[in-house]
Every structure is written in C-alpha cells, then in structure tokens.
Image (cartoon, grey):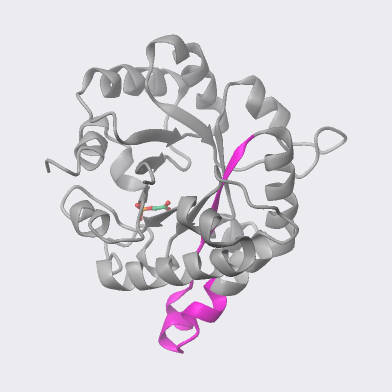
C-alpha cells in the first residue's frame, strides 16, 4: 500500500513570520496520520520549518536546487544546504521553472541525480500544455519528461512524480479525475518498463492543478493517484487541512 502524500507548494508566498504562524496553526488542526503531509515553501521559510521541527508533524522540502554541491554559482542553493535545514523533499521541474526560467529536461535530470545522491527525495513534476493536449501530444510530452527526468537513475522507492497539466495550474480548471488517472497510469507503466513491477507499485504519483477541498475526493479514489501537489489552496492552513482530511471532506 502506498501512503497518500498531500504536498503544499507555496510558490513565492509568505515571510518567515507567516510561515511560523502557519506551522503552528496547521499542527493544531486534526489530521489523519495515515496521510503524509508536506509543505514546499520558499527557501527563506525553510528556516521556520527547521526551527519548529521538534513540535511539528509537517515534512518539508524546497522548490528547487542547483545541480552542484558547491562552487561559484551566485544565487543558487545546493542540496547540501537543504539537507542542513532538515529538508526531506525537493521539487524539480515544476512547469513554472520549465517555462519562466527555461529549465530543460537535461538540467532537471542533473538536479534529480544529485538530489538522490545527496539524500533528498525529488518530487519530479511533469505535465503537458493546453496546445500539446489539444494536438493529441499529451502522452508523448509527459512520457518524454518522465524518461528524461529519470535517465541514469536506478529504482528508488522514495522518489515521487507529480503529474500537473500546465493548463490546470492556478486556473481553477482541474483535469477530470479520469483523465488524471489515465495519465498517471501511463506514467506508472513507463516506470514499470524502466524499473520493474515492484518499483512501479511502490512509487507514489500525485496529481496537481487546481486541487481544492471540493475535488480532492474524486482524485483520491482513483487506483493510481497517490496524493496531490496543491498550490493556491495550500496557503491557508484550514483549507489545506480540509484537503489533507479528504476522507472526511
Ligand atoms: P494550483 O498549483 O493548485 O494553484 O493549481 C499547483 C502547482 O503549481 O503545484
């Protein structure tokens, strides 16, 4: 059985003080411990999570990292720095980084290999644009992103993949649960071919794109959907807790 993972991607929101307040509030709300909860805040807020770690049930990670351990890379953050702040996860290949920052599959693969080598668990984000979906290329694009992202990587049970169709991110228009299930099954089949049946059964694959308390239940009943990567709806701890408690919402 794969343990559900609900991860909140704060993107470029919140100060350290706001993060500390959020951590306190979310920890005070009841949630079902069979669900793993993670928050992916901006780099600066990681300090608040590290500081609260002994009294917090929230796992956490960064939104990006660089592909080298250290060196003359002004403005970049090393995976070793993230580990130093107690991060478990690192988001890699989010569509905003692919599209706005021009990150290529090659860069993402370099980062992913170093993340695993140093002990961080990557959440690899993949997903097609609206044009790619409308021209019938969604699977081809997502398949390439998965294969590229995992090139040269041996099976790793802690790795997570997030399928986030670009047209569903921040738009309020989510994919239907059956379309998301169909794509996520397709991704699991690729993992099975590359890594074998056991690894494919163990690997968690999330859906992301306009997830909210009202639609999380539809996704979570699908066979292959193991959780969600939540953007906007993760910014308020009460709304995020309603998503985490999808079994009772
Ligand atoms: P959204 O963002 O939930 O606001 O659509 C999801 C994401 O970008 O991870």
Choose top left, top right, bottom left or bottom right for residue 14.
Answer: top left
Residue 126 can be seen, yes or no:
yes
Q: Say whether residue 194 is magenta.
A: no
Q: Position of residue 202 (x, y in %)?
A: 48, 50
Looking at the image, how many numbered discs can be counted on the residues?
0
Q: Does residue 141 sit above or below 234 in this rendering?
A: below
Using residue 234 as the reference point, say whether residue 239 is left or right of it.
left
Q: Position of residue 88 (x, y in %)?
A: 55, 31
User: Residue shown at 50%/84% (left/top)?
Assistant: 137
Residue 66 can be seen, yes or no:
no
Choose top left, top right, bottom left or bottom right for residue 168.
Answer: bottom left
- Residue interval drawn in magenta: 120-142
User: Residue shown at 23%/50% (left/top)?
Assistant: 212
Using residue 17 as the reference point, say whether residue 90 is left or right of it.
right
Q: Does residue 223 sit above or below 43 in this rendering?
A: below
Query: Of all residues shown, which one is farthest toward the right?
Result: 72
Query: Of all residues shown, which one is farthest toward the left?
Result: 248
Compare residues 208 and 77 and report the one nearer the observer.
208
Q: Position of residue 5 (x, y in %)?
A: 38, 42
Choose top left, top right, bottom left or bottom right for residue 25.
Answer: top left
Compare residues 4 and 106 and report the one nearer the observer.
4
- Quarter of the image containing the C terminus? top left
Q: Position of residue 172 (x, y in %)?
A: 27, 61
Using residue 248 as the reference point, say whether residue 47 is left or right of it.
right
User: Residue shown at 55%/76% (left/top)?
Assistant: 141
Query: Of all residues shown, which one is farthest toward the bottom?
Result: 135
Q: Say whether residue 122 is magenta.
A: yes
């Amino acid at each position: 059985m794969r343990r559900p993972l609900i991860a909140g991607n704060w993107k470029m929101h919140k100060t350290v003080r706001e993060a500390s307040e959020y951590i306190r509030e979310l920890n005070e709300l009841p949630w079902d411990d069979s669900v793993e909860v993670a928050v992916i805040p901006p780099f600066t807020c990681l300090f608040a999570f590290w500081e609260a770690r002994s009294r917090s049930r929230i796992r956490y990670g960064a939104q990006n990292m660089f592909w080298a351990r250290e060196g003359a890379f002004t403005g970049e953050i090393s995976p070793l720095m993230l580990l130093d702040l107690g991060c478990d996860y690192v988001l890699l290949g989010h569509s905003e980084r692919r599209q706005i920052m021009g990150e290529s599959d090659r860069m993402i693969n370099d980062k992913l290999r170093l993340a695993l080598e140093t002990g961080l668990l990557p959440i690899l984000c993949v997903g097609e644009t609206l044009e790619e979906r409308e021209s019938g290329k969604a699977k081809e694009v997502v398949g390439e992103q998965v294969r590229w992202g995992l090139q040269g990587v041996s099976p790793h049970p802690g790795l997570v993949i997030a399928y986030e169709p670009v047209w569903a991110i921040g738009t309020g228009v989510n994919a239907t649960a059956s379309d998301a299930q169909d794509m996520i099954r397709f991704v699991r089949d690729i993992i099975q071919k590359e890594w074998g049946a056991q690894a494919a059964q163990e690997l968690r694959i999330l859906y992301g794109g306009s997830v909210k308390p009202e639609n999380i239940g539809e996704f979570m009943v699908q066979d292959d959907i193991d959780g969600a990567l939540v953007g906007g709806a993760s910014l308020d701890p009460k709304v995020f807790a309603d998503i985490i408690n999808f079994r009772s919402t």
